[in-house]
Image (cartoon, grey):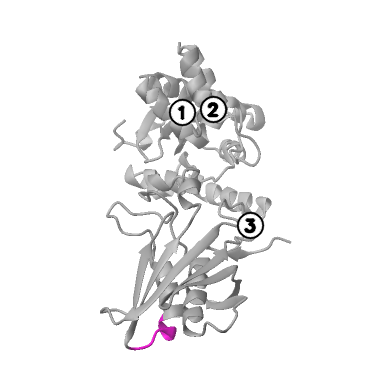
Amino acid sequence: MVRSGYTLPVFAVAAAKAALLHLQTPQESLASVLIDLPTESAEIPIQQLATLESDSALGMTLSDPGDNLDLTRNMLIWAWVKLAAWQGQPLILEGGEGLGKLPTGEAAIYSFARQLFEANLLPLIPADRSVTVRIILPQGRQLARRTSNEAFGILEGLALLGTSGISQPLSAADQLEEFRIDLQAKVKQSPNLVFCIGQNGLQVAQRLRIPESTIVQTSNWLGALLVEAGLRGARSVLLLGYQGKLIKLASGIFNTSSHLADGRLETIAAAVAQMGGDLVAVQQVLQAETADAAYQHLVQLHLAKPVFQHMAAKIQQRSEAYVKKYADTALSVGVILFDRRGEIIVRHGATLSQAPNDQP
């Protein structure tokens, strides 16, 4: 039985509510607070409370996304809360260290999170006072390096986003079945499909004006869905994804979940060697902290284009062979790899006409 949890905004609001209540009634001890969500109430444990000054306090919670594979599990969330004289609005939300910023410089606190803060904090704020809430994610900047946030324009940290507050996991079988059903419906409309790996892939597809009727989201299920496409009569599939995910296919890894297999740096290093890179270049790749850092090293060495073109060709070859092996049919596969910011690195294969507005 899988266990549901809550999204990051819920824990941020809980930390802020606990700190505000602590300011108003410091003699009371709070082990948890009740947060009103659109469809239910959630009781969120409070890890710690501290009075900083007579008008400010700090509340702390730990993120619990349930049984979802989420890198924010057990991440500490701080809310600094200050109660002051009226400042023109009752609630002022700020982003502290680890909370991402939008390109405008505004804190990455999205509409649902703002609504959740207002619903739970406004009733507690006296009519003649204002409350400033600053959300701090001590691990946010570090964890953001392991996400594709920059492709969404979220810089220097994590975002407070969501649509319901509830993090409801699907079993692996249920998730794959949803993707298969969507693919089966899409291939009836078009024999040429575009596989988008993750939400960042979807965003790039939308920017390239690829018709939504051809787009199939895949999560990590590349191999199973490529075979499904072949079995359902698709003529071609364009694989569109962040290079740090998609290059796993070049090594024959067709489920791209990091919980199952990795090998990204080794895959890039092998390609560097095959394309004539020296030992220093290979070592720089192997010592890089992330696939994106490895890519940046290769950009500086003027090796990025040939190396990633080589890997795109390997992805095409291995994908077509995979479908032939397991579906006994021919499927034409094209590849578009992009970087953390959603900028195209290389494109390869016969299905590139599905992205006519792309400029490499």
Instruction: Identify whether 10 is placed above or below 175.
Output: below
State how far apart marks 3 and 1 are (Cα).
33 Å
Image coordinates for residue 45, horizontal then vertical, percent: 61, 71
Quadrant in the picture for the C terminus? top left
Dot 3 amino acid type: Leu
Image coordinates for residue 323, horizontal then vertical, percent: 60, 30
Q: Which residue is mark 2?
A: 265
Instruction: Identify whether 215 is placed above or below 288.
Output: below
Along the line of sight, the residue nearer the viewer: 70 or 136: 136
Residue 125 forms part of the magenta stretch? yes
Looking at this rendering, what residue extends furthest in the bottom direction? 127
Q: Nearer the viewer, mark 3 or mark 2?
A: 2
Dot 2 amino acid type: Leu
Along the line of sight, the residue nearer the viewer: 65 or 347: 65
Instruction: Please tell me how many numbered marks the rendered image carries.
Output: 3
Dot 3 or dot 1, earlier in sequence: 3
Q: Residue at x 58, y 83 (%)?
A: 28
Q: Where does the magenta region start and end?
A: 122-127
Image coordinates for residue 16, horizontal then vertical, percent: 47, 72
Q: Which residue is mark 1?
A: 294
**Can residue 320 be seen in the rendering of this structure?**
no
Element class at badge 3:
loop
Dot 2 or dot 1, earlier in sequence: 2
Image coordinates for residue 340, horizontal then vertical, percent: 41, 39
**Can residue 261 be seen in the rendering of this structure?**
yes
Q: Which mark is residue 132?
A: none
Q: Which mark is residue 170?
A: 3
Instruction: Identify whether 46 is placed above or below 349.
Output: below
Element class at badge 1:
helix
Q: Determine contact: label 2, label 1, CB under 8 Å.
A: yes
